[in-house]
Image (cartoon, grey):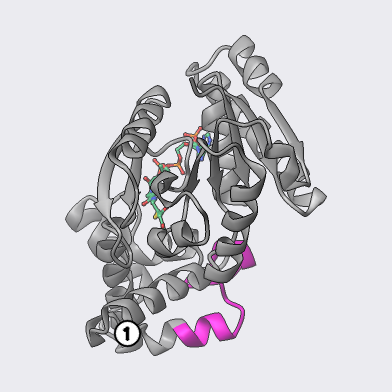
Amino acid sequence: MIQRIGVVGAGTMGNGIAQVFAQAGFVVRLIDAVPAALERARGTIEKSLTKFVEKGRLTAADREAALAHLSIGTNLDELADVDYVIEAIAEQAEAKAGVFTRLDAITRPHVILASNTSSISITVLGAATARPDRVLGMHFMNPVPLMSLVELIRGQATSAESMLTATNLCMQLGKTAVEAADYPGFIANRILMPMINEAIYAVMEGVGTPEAIDTVMKLGMNHPMGPLTLADFIGLDVCLAILDVLHQGLGDPKYRPCPLLRRMVAAGHFGRKSGRGFYSY
Ligand code: CAA
């Protein structure tokens, strides 16, 4: 039975993932090499839980219980006794593969090692371990506490049993799991990123202002956020990294990242997190 969850990486996604597991009653250990990132993550989780209490979606006792389920640490070795791990470090293939090799050595052999990667190959991460049948993708959407989808990615060697375990966990979190095959970008980013990229081409070519493009997609297509607001929210550096994976992995020029996106990232205009992207924050 899965009770103890290890989460590696305390960034936006890692802290959201830790929160939803803690809220669902799992014992969660959140690991990050940087103590300040862990403190920030705890603060973010506390704020999010407080928001849910204010909205009547959670009782104050549930909030306290969730916080009591959560512990933080800086060393991967602290995951030796967990039942399931989700890695959510930065989107760098070599760094992720290195974490998987270490997790393979640290955790017990039957434990499933999942990655929250948005586009890196699960098969490659599985090959960095001696348990590729127990490596899969568990791709949450941002903001994790609000979004009900989890994309589950089956690598070349992932077993049906591992996929079933992950699907059941998603149900326990109150989220809907959708299975995707291990091709670049899986389903979510295979479709989302070309839309965002096209919106950036439309800005570059002067088809419309960012405000005009976002308004068309919000009011015309009922999207909750326009594609440029969403790109700023995801992070323009993250969007570029995913488009590079699609372009390289699929080899089709339709996925080439827009030069304006490259230029904005080169300038350090990463969107909301840097205070400037298509909009100012
Ligand atoms: N925890 C708790 N509450 C939160 C929260 C969190 N983490 N984040 C936001 N909220 C609250 C807000 O504070 C707000 O509360 P109030 O109503 O009291 O102000 C409430 O949720 C609603 O937020 P907003 O007012 O900002 O309004 P919204 O109706 O636009 O909802 C949203 C926000 C759910 C994010 C919505 O805009 C949305 O669905 N946007 C699209 C998100 C999306 O596409 N995500 C996927 C990104 S792609 C990805 O993640 C994968 C990848 O690989 C790149």
Q: How many marks?
A: 1
> Label 1 crowding class (10 Å Cα cut-off): few <14, some 14-19, many 20+?
some
Residue 72 can be seen, yes or no: yes
Q: What residue is rendered at 64% in x and 49% in y? A: 105
In-front residue for pair 15/212: 15
**Whole-percent x, y for residue 168 in the image:** 35, 27
For the point 34% across and 48% down, the residue is 158
Q: Residue furthest right?
A: 35
Q: Which residues are magenta?
A: 262-278
Residue 208, how many percent across, how many down? 29, 79
Compared with 96, 258 (above or below) is: below
Q: Secondary structure at mark 1?
A: loop
**Residue at disc 1, CB closer than 8 Å to ligand 1:** no
Question: Relative to residue 232, is residue 7 drawn left or right?
Answer: right
Specify the quadrant of the image occupied by residue 44: top right
Q: Answer whether residue 9 is visible to the viewer in this image.
A: no
* Residue that appears at 47% across and 18% down: 57
Kindly identify which residue carries mark 1. Answer: 256
Q: Is residue 147 magenta?
A: no
Please name whichever residue, 206 or 78, is drawn nearer the observer in this view of the structure.
78
Q: Amino acid at mark 1?
A: Arg
Q: Is residue 275 left or right of residue 196?
A: right
- Is 274 covered by the magenta stretch? yes
Q: Whole-percent x and y of residue 62?
A: 59, 14
Residue 41 falls left or right of residue 170: right
**100 vs 280, nearest the viewer:** 100
Residue 42: quarter of image? top right
Q: Note whether 101 is above or below 171 in the view shown.
A: below
Specify the quarter for ligand 1: top left
